[in-house]
Image: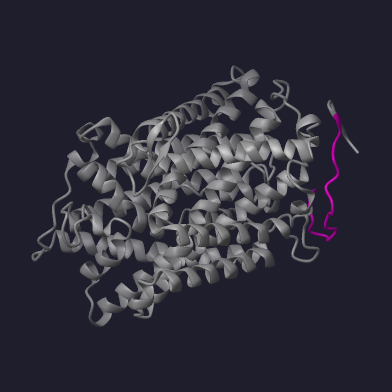
Amino acid sequence: MPQSPNGPAPAVEPRATGSGAGEKGLKTGALGLVSSVAIGLASTAPAYSLAATLGIIVIGVGLQAPIITVLAFIPMLLIAYAYKELNASDPDCGTTFTWAARAFGPRTGWMGGWGIIIADIIVMANLAQIAGVYGFRLFGLDSLADSTVWTSIAGVVWIIVMTAICYVGIELSAALQRWLLSVEVVMLVLLSVTALVKAYGSSPPPTAIHISASWFNPFNVASTGAFTAGMLAAVFIYWGWDTAVSVNEETADAKRTPGRAAVISTVLLLLIYTLVSTSALAFAGVGTDGIGLGNEDNSGDVLSGLGDAVFGTAGFGGFLSKLLIFMVLTSAAASTQTTILPTARTSFSMAAHKAIPAPFGRVHPRHLTPTWSTIGMGVASIAFYVLLTAISGNVLADSIASVGLGIAFYYGLTGFACVWYYRRVLTRSVKDFVFKGIFPLVGGVMLLYFFCYGAFDVYADPDYGATSVNLPIFGETGGVTVIGIGALVLGGVLMLVQWAVQGSWFRHPDVPVSTADPADAP
């Protein structure tokens, strides 16, 4: 067994021994570039993300919503390059956990892994709720869609079904993603084109406004606070492309394909979001009544009302409106599935490296997928969802807003880890300097700024969001900050517990702190 400078590398037990099993026991070569891109796109759930977030962005920045969605793409693309470069050196399914440990040490790596896990568990609650609500609306069961009990039951069922699919195998998951994503993209393009045709037609809706260059001028945003809040919300709609990298050990050409898929996914998302946000704004406007995107009553779901207005409610138009509802449902379902994938593989990698209890490192002998990690993610998501729903719908709403802090935390950490790990090779070539240094550093700094400004200014305002908490020393604090920062603090506590109970990862990590060797081929 290879030795690390700090002691023997721990064994990964138990390992699968099938012909397709890789080093940790996962099925190798199961995914190609197309499947990886599909998983990266589906994980962001474009339809669900737009339905849940576009209204919030418009309420915050008004007509500048399109440029905010474009600008939010910049840090995402820069961090995607950080993922691409780090994956080329170390294609480990733990991603940020492993890479941050290699750059900064085991404690920082552990917190990076926790950032992925907690962000995914929190967002699963909202995905489950959306899937439950849209499932009932699809069949015209509006009374059940308005029932907390029934939507909770439906949401739990969705989590169970998607957990089972992830448990059965990565290839089935990828095949389902390709099908669901095809429906989603086609419907979003159809909605956008139809909305633009009607907005510029002979009988436009009274809310319609023509596209203007001012929509793409960020200096027209009212305030720095509004700009930052809008950016944090917009960052959320891009989140998820890193799933394509988290399944790297199950991908053909593991060092190149996942990184390429991450970059391609972010570029495709930019095109989708720019088209939909611009066309929706042109058709519905920013009014605070009716289908206006500034209507706070619609902010949590702008697409259902927009679909009825664009397609109509009778005949073929009614069918398309129902299909749009189905698309948001499948988008949430697809994202539920692809949210389980990276979290299960992060915890699986952490267990394989002895950073969390060993059972989470078990692999199914036939399916070659993580067993305890996959089931554990499903159980934790159900528990969190039921708990928050039982406490208050307001707490659930603020928990979703807090996801942006978790995203900024572990994406930003990945950017800094890339720069620090490659610091000795940055002067080797212009390409290395840009893609291993400048891009990840700028992306990391941007996300650090959004995290700090959001957590300690915008979200900390007790008037922001639906809840607030009176904290000792800090006083009345917004619920979004309390949940977001509290979740990360909880991770620090759990890390100390793990250190005390099973501290081999912290005392003798098998991923020692190191830097890229300038002698290695670029």
Give the x, y percent position of residue 333.
49, 65
* Residue 399 in the figure: left or right of residue 23: left
Q: In this rendering, does residue 99 appear at all?
A: yes
- Dividing the picture into quarters, in which one does residue 115 lie? top right
- Dividing the picture into quarters, in which one does residue 215 lie? top left
Range of residues picked out in magenta: 7-24
* Residue 275 in the figure: left or right of residue 47: left
Q: Depth check: give the residue in front, 26 or 158.
A: 158
In this rendering, is residue 117 above or below 316?
above
The quarter of the picture where the C terminus appears is: top right
Q: Residue at x 49, y 68 (%)?
A: 155
Q: Depth check: give the residue in front, 105 or 94.
A: 105
Give the x, y percent position of residue 302.
29, 60
Q: Residue at x 19, y 57 (%)?
A: 292
Q: Depth check: give the residue in front, 331 or 128.
A: 128
Magenta residues: mostly which secondary structure?
Answer: loop
* Residue 31 in the figure: left or right of residue 476: right
Q: Residue at x 62, y 48 (%)?
A: 246
Give the x, y percent position of residue 3.
88, 32
The quarter of the picture where the N terminus appears is: top right
Badge count: 0
Give the x, y percent position of residue 340.
59, 57
Residue, far right: 1
Q: Residue at x 40, y 62 (%)?
A: 185
Q: In this rendering, does residue 34 appear at all?
A: no
Queried whether the magenta region covers residue 14, the answer comes back as yes
Queried whether the magenta region covers residue 154, the answer comes back as no
- Dividing the picture into quarters, in which one does residue 187 lie? bottom left
In this rendering, is residue 326 above or below 26?
below
Q: Depth check: give the residue in front, 247 or 447.
A: 447
